[in-house]
Amino acid sequence: MPKKSKELSALAVAKIKETGRYTVGGVDGLCLNVEGSSRVWILRAIVGKRLDKDGKLKPHRRDIGLGPYPAVSLAEARVKANELKSQIRNGIDPIAHKQVQLEKLHSQKLREKTFSECAEVVIANKTRELKNQKHIGQWSSTLETYIYPTLGDRTIGSITKVEIAEILKPIWVDKNETAKRIRGRIETIFDYAKAMGYFVGDNPAEWKGNLEPILGNFKQEPRPHPSLPYEQVADFIQHLRQKKGIAPKALEFAILTACRSGEVFGAKWHEIDFKNKVWVIPKERMKADKEHRVPLSEQTIGLLESIQQYTQADDFIFPAPRNGGMLSDMSLTTLIKRMHEQKFKENSVGYIDPKQNRIITTHGFRSTFRDWSADKTDYPREVCEHVLAHKLPDEVEASYLRGGYLEKRKGLMADWTEFCCTHFN
């Protein structure tokens, strides 16, 4: 029968300083291991058997750490040692058991990732994928407005399809297009979470056979962007030129070039060919993924020259006032809304699309240009469509227009500018 180790007192253990391994008694195999200034509790125990070099089964002695001394007291070390020896008697390997527990804890922590944490990663990935800064901004803004207040801080693994449906229901009819885009974004975020192991099971934001029976399909007739009748454009620009700041300049530039707001917001000085009076928009910023050449009238060149001295060569032409980054659609939407309210006080009408009875939008000025060019000019339809960078059905025709019709488009844009600025000529 093996000799029992002397049971040391807490005071006796505190006096142990020299390097070595000291049995402290109380529990067979409990030792204090001292190496320099380090003092650690060790339980030396037999855990099962293992094959030796001769292929024979022998007792498997293992050192199991119980923590540092004095953070773990002598009494605590004896309690831990007794618990581990009890596990061993029941056929449990304490080290393997601890590893399993750590893996479970790690897995649990992974599943504690919140919806907003996962969304941040997906948005960062989308920032690299998407070429349109406007679309990137919409990812963040729609989630912040509709999803984060309710689900942002929830662990993504706990969110159900019913909860997602409840969030989308209030806007499913009135803002169906926005709601559908949000649903798609939520689905993408759950796809990422599932791939990372933060979520297990079917994607709760899937449409077919999942959210579709709850929300139902909604057929929405497409409505064009509210636009101003072209007879009122000159009055609008006269009013616009009374406004100070970069947003009114950006809006006037968008009107005179008939370009999309995102193309205007992303414009940089190196894209402007002042000599030939052309703005060359790279394909990366075009909806059709093709370079677009925009003829610039004398008045439009003058507008650019009036602000050029206030920015650097590498800056955006129309930088956001606060941070020098890109303007947002909201800046122009707010500007138009305020101008409408001022005009409404004068004539009780304001700036309204008479067909839709809705306040006009920046994008609507492209429709205004198209209506004017069809009603008031003899330019070919293809030339007018190319000004708007619409994709033509005939690729050969489109290729021809990009070259030979540039002069016609210069004339068209000069006529449009003259029409828009008749009050100032």
Image (cartoon, helix red, strand yellow):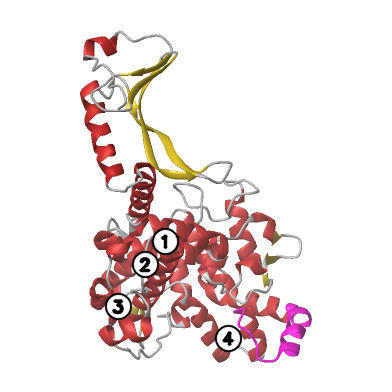
Seen from the viewer's position, the closer of residues 347 and 193 is 193
Of badges 1 and 4, the one in the foreground is: 1
Q: Secondary structure at mark 2?
A: loop
Q: Secondary structure at mark 4?
A: helix
Which x, y percent locates residue 2? 32, 25
Work out which quarter of the rendered image holds the N terminus and state it: top left
- Callout 1 touching callout 2 (CB < 8 Å): yes
Name the residue beneath numbered marker 3: 349
Which x, y percent locates residue 156? 32, 61
Name the residue beneath numbered marker 2: 200
Residue 274 as seen in the image, left or right of residue 124: right
What is the three-letter code of the residue carrying label 1? Gly
Q: In this picture, which residue range is highlighted in magenta?
A: 388-406
Residue in view at x 26 percent, y 16 percent: 6
Which x, y percent locates residue 273? 72, 61
Of badges 4 and 2, the one in the foreground is: 2
Displayed quadrant of residue 398:
bottom right
Is residue 364 shown in magenta? no
Mark 4 or mark 2: whose residue is earlier in sequence: 2
Name the residue beneath numbered marker 4: 373
Seen from the viewer's position, the closer of residues 112 and 228 is 112
Q: Residues within 10 Å of mark 2 (few under 14, many from 20)?
A: some
Q: Residue furthest front?
A: 1
What is the three-letter code of the residue carrying label 4? Ser
Residue in view at x 56 percent, y 72 percent: 259
Residue in view at x 45 percent, y 56 percent: 121
Mark 1 or mark 3: whose residue is earlier in sequence: 1
Mark 4 or mark 3: whose residue is earlier in sequence: 3
399 above or below 98? below
